[in-house]
């Protein structure tokens, strides 16, 4: 393996790590904004369910609070998607298709100005 191939693989790995951090940052942002807002709006329903839990109370509590329910569903779904995606890459490694996509993305990043933060972090961080 040539030295340039090693550097390319390191840059692809750094780009993958950057994508991973961006996805988890998005999830954290969703939970701290949309998730907390949704939980706050459902707080009265939680108290009611704690005192008198019935399936009808649950159904009507969710049916009349659609925005908070969709907010919690979105946060839960996006977390599950990223957990599945990340677990798949941990267990199986990157697929050849994913590697090609990352290499193409890396080519675009290399065309950016040298002062661009993305290029500095992905390309210039590897020596």
Image (cartoon, rainbow, N blue to C red):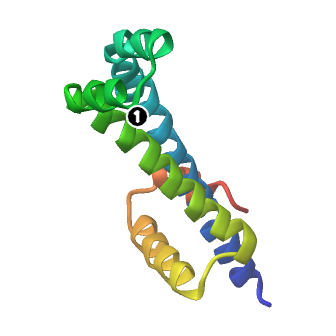
Q: Is residue 117 visible?
A: no
58 relative position to 91: left or right: left
Residue placed at 64% from the left, 69% from the top?
Answer: 88
Placement of 111 over or under 48, stated as above or below: below
Quadrant of res 40: top left
Q: Residues within 10 Å of mark 1 (few under 14, many from 20)?
A: many
Q: Which residue is at the far right?
A: 1
Residue placed at 71% from the left, 77% from the top?
Answer: 92
95 or 125: which is nearer to us?
Answer: 95
Residue placed at 46% from the left, 78% from the top?
Answer: 101
Task: State how many labels appear.
Answer: 1
**Which quarter of the image is occupied by the C terminus?**
bottom right
Q: Which residue is at the far bottom?
A: 1
Residue 107 place in picture, x, y as percent: 45, 75
Residue 122 place in picture, x, y as percent: 57, 58
Quadrant of res 112: bottom left
Placement of 52 over or under 2, stated as above or below: above
79 relative position to 71: left or right: right
Residue 23 place in picture, x, y as percent: 49, 49
Q: Which residue is mark 1?
A: 30
Residue 64 place in picture, x, y as percent: 19, 26
Placement of 64 over or under 4, stated as above or below: above
101 or 2: which is nearer to us?
Answer: 101
24 relative position to 63: left or right: right
Residue placed at 50% from the left, 47% from the top?
Answer: 79
Placement of 13 over or under 103, stated as above or below: above
**Which quarter of the image is occupied by the N terminus?**
bottom right
Q: Is residue 85 visible?
A: yes
């Amino acid at each position: 393996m040539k030295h340039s191939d090693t550097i390319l693989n390191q840059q692809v790995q750094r780009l993958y790590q950057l994508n991973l951090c961006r996805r988890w940052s998005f999830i954290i942002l969703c939970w701290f904004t949309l998730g907390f807002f949704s939980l706050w709006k459902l707080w009265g329903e939680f108290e009611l369910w704690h005192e008198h839990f019935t399936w009808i109370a649950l159904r009507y509590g969710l049916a009349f609070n659609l925005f908070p329910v969709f907010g919690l569903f979105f946060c839960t779904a996006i977390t599950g998607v990223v957990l599945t995606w990340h677990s798949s890459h941990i267990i199986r490694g990157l697929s050849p298709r994913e590697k090609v996509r990352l290499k193409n993305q890396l080519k675009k990043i290399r065309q950016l100005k040298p002062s661009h933060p993305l290029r500095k972090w992905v390309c210039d961080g590897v020596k």
